[in-house]
Image: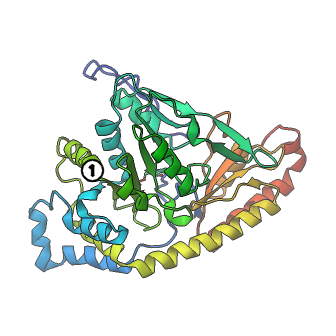
Amino acid sequence: MSHAHSGSTPSPFWSPGLEALHPYVPGEQPRTPPRAKLNTNENPYPPSPRAVAAMRAVLDQSQADALRLYPDPTSLALRSALAQESGLSADQVFVGNGSDEVLAFAFQGLFRHPGRPLAFPEVSYSFYPVYCGLYGIESMTLPMRAEGERGEALIFDLDGVPRHACGLIFPNPNAPTSIAKPRQEIERLLQARPELLVLVDEAYVDFGAQSCVPLIHDHPNLLVSQSFSKSRGLAGLRLGMAFGQAPLIEALVRVKDSVNSYPIDRLALAGGTAAVEDRAHFEQTRDAIVRDRGALRSGLLALDFAVAEPAGNFVFAKAPLGQDALGLAQALRTQGILVRHFNTPMLRDFLRITVGRAEENALLLEALRALLAAQPEVGRQGVGL
Ligand SMILES: Cc1ncc(COP(=O)(O)O)c(C=O)c1O
C-alpha cells in the first residue's frame, strides 16, 4: 500500500544527509471516496457547525478583505480559548499547523542534546524516528512485550528510560495499539525523573485516556501535545497544540519564529477557536465514536480477532489464528474498504481499524466475515489471501 516517496532521484543540489532520510509515509488518501475510509484515524463526523460558520464568516464579503493581511502571529484568540478550557494561562499554550508541526518544533527545540538520546516505545507513532533523522537526534527504544491470550496487547514500561536520556515521548493512548497508560503512572515518572523531559502525545486522548494536562502546574518537565484532527473532526484544517509551563512553550515559539511566524492562517484561527467553544458538538460526536468502538470491537472478537481494550478512535486487531492480516487488508481494499496494515515483524499480524460511522463499521465486519468464511482453509495453512 506504499505510494509516493518511492523512486527518489537524488540531485547534487540536495543538502548532505537528505538522501539518507526516511520520510514518513502517510496513510492513503484516495481521490475518490472509498466505501469505508478506516485507515487514517480521521473523525467520521463533520466538525462543529459553529466552526464552519466562523470560517464562512471570514470569507464573507465584509471580512474577506482581511485576507490581505497576515494573521495574528501569536494566535492569541485560539490560545486563550484553549487555555480557558484546560485551566491554564495563554503563555502555557502553543498552537501549530497540526500536531505534527508542534512535535517537529519540540524535537528541534527541546530534544537536541548531543550524547543524550530521546527515548520512545519500540511500537509508537512512526513520525518520531523521522524527526530524529531530520534533526540528528540520537534515539533509543523502550521494548514492547505482548500480553493477552494471543499476545494482542503490546505494552511498554515507563521505568526503562536510561539515566542519560534527555527525554521521553510516547502517544497516550499509544498508536497504533490504542492502549492507554493511567495518568498516575506518568506522574510517578515525572516525580522520579525531574531531569527528564516527558512529552505525552495526546492526539487520541479524548476517546478514553486521562489527560496529563492537569499535571502541568506541578511538573516543569512535562509537555503535552494534542490535535484538532481526531476528536474535533478537523484533520483538513491542520491544527495542533501543546501545553506546558511557559519556558517549554517559549522554546516552541522560538523555533516557530525561526521557521514561519504565521503557521495558523485566518481561517484556522477562526474555525479552531469556534470549535473549542462548541463543547456540545465535541462531546456528542466523541460519545458516538466511543459507543461504536465497543460494537466494532465486539464484532471483531466474534470473528476470532484478538483485540485489546482500545482507548483511541481506532482498534488494533490481531487477525484470527493462521489468517494473513496483509492479505485481509488487500482484499478489503479491492472492496473499497480501507484499513491500515504495518508490515513489520511485530505488527504484521494486526490491522489498525479506525472507528467509522456505524454503517461503515458494519460494512467492514460483513466483508471480513465473508472473507474469513470463504477462505478458512487457505488462511489456516498460512498460504494467505
Ligand atoms: C500519535 C499521533 N500523534 C500525532 C499525530 C498528528 O496529528 P496532526 O498533525 O493531524 O495533529 C498523529 C496522526 O495520526 C498521531 O497518530
Where 146 falls versus 266 (above or below)? above
Nearer to the camera, 361 or 180 = 180
Q: Position of residue 46 (x, y in %)?
A: 44, 73
Report the residue at 42% width, 46% height from top: 199
Where 196 falls versus 291 (above or below)? above
Instruction: Tell me the quadrant of the picture where the C terminus can be found.
Output: top right
Instruction: Tell me: 262 left or right of 315.
Output: left
Quadrant assignment, res 157: top right
Q: Amino acid at mark 1?
A: Ile
Residue to which mark 1 is pinned: 249
Quadrant assignment, res 374: bottom right
In this orientation, does residue 366 appear?
Answer: no
Q: Position of residue 252 (x, y in %)?
A: 26, 46
Element at badge 1? Answer: helix
Instruction: Tell me: 260 left or right of 200.
Output: left
Classify 10 Å Cα crowding around label 1: few (below 14), some (14-19), many (20 and above).
many
Report the residue at 24% width, 63% height from top: 90
Quadrant assignment, res 313: bottom right
Where 167 falls versus 38 (above or below)? above
Q: Position of residue 29 (x, y in %)?
A: 48, 53
